[in-house]
């Protein structure tokens, strides 16, 4: 089935729409846009040049997808926004293309939910299975790992990372990396409260995996150990376990430091 386009929509002849995609009233799709099969696009959306979208995505009304980055150095260069499959974009979300200085690409993978008014800035990279609550905001160059949850009215500073399976509480403002598997909440400064135990259990983490993360956190927050000593002890006592190794690698690769509390 060919794409179904509302008569009031404006679709550039150079845009490519997949079979079964439905375009709602007053939506604008610019040239050099590719939208895959079976996407649902509501009214008053705008898709900027350089945007590539996979299949079975749903866009509610007033989505701004692939607009130019909010970067004073940007001079109109050809950059990209790439979106995977089966994502949901609710009302008034804004997703910007990359910048030449940041690699030229903003990327969103699969099966994510972006609630109303979410903003993802230039050169961000979001994994799969994430949930962004209302008004969650990523500054430029932020990385968000798979299966993480970013709470409402949360702001993540540019060049920060959010680890996989992380839970970021509402109203959090973080200028450091947020640990994978952990609950980070608050602002000025935020604090990490240890493993997101309930969330990990709901996701099917075994008791053994959850216990290993609790033991990791206990050592990491030992007041008698500095961070280097804690990491060494964690590796000695818990090393070789996949989740533990992921946390160790995340901390050791951090350029901005991590939120501990």
Image (cartoon, rainbow, N blue to C red):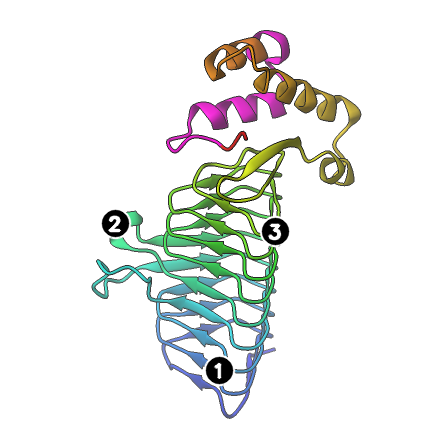
Circle 1 SS class: loop
Seen as rendered, the residue at the extreme bottom is 7
Disc number lying in front (1 or 2): 2
Seen as rendered, the residue at the extreme front is 188
Disc number lying in front (1 or 3): 3
Q: Which residues are magenta?
A: 235-258
| Quadrant in the picture for residue 166 | top right
Q: Count residues near mark 2 (Cα–Cα under 10 Å), then give few for <14, some for 14-19, many for 20+.
A: few
The secondary structure that most of the magenta stretch takes on is helix
Circle 2 SS class: helix
Q: How far, Cα to Cα, is label 3 from label 2?
A: 31 Å
Q: Count residues near mark 3 (Cα–Cα under 10 Å), then give few for <14, some for 14-19, many for 20+.
A: many
* Residue 157 pos. (x, y %): 42, 47
User: Circle 2 sits on which residue?
Assistant: 101
Q: Residue at x 21, y 58 (%)?
A: 73
Q: How far, Cα to Cα, is label 1 from label 2?
A: 30 Å
User: Circle 3 sits on which residue?
Assistant: 170
Q: Are marks 3 and 2 in contact (CB under 8 Å)?
A: no
Q: Is residue 157 above or below residue 164?
A: below
Whether residue 46 sits left or right of residue 42 in the image: it is: left
């Amino acid at each position: 089935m060919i794409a179904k386009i509302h008569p009031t929509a404006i679709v550039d002849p150079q845009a490519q729409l997949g079979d079964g995609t439905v375009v709602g009233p007053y939506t604008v799709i610019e040239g050099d846009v590719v939208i895959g099969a079976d996407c649902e696009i509501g009214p008053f959306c705008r898709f900027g040049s350089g945007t590539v979208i996979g299949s079975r995505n749903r866009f509610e009304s007033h989505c701004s997808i692939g607009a130019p980055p909010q970067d004073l150095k940007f001079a109109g260069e050809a950059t990209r926004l790439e979106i995977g499959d089966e994502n949901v974009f609710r009302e008034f979300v804004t997703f910007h293309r990359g910048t030449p200085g940041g690699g030229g690409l903003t990327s969103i993978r699969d099966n994510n939910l972006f609630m109303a008014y979410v903003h993802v800035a230039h050169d961000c990279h979001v994994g799969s299975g994430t949930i962004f609550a209302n008004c969650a905001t990523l500054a430029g160059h932020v990385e968000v790992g798979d299966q993480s949850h970013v709470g409402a009215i949360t702001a993540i500073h540019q060049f920060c990372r959010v680890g996989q399976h992380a839970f970021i509480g509402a109203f959090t403002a973080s200028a450091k990396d947020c640990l994978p598997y952990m609950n980070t909440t608050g602002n000025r400064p935020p604090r990490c409260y240890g493993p997101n135990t309930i969330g990990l259990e709901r996701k099917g983490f075994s008791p053994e995996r959850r216990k290993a993360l609790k033991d990791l956190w206990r050592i990491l927050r030992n007041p008698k150990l500095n961070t280097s000593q804690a990491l060494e002890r964690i590796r000695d006592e818990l090393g070789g376990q996949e989740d533990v190794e992921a946390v160790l690698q995340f901390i050791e690769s951090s350029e901005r430091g991590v939120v501990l509390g």
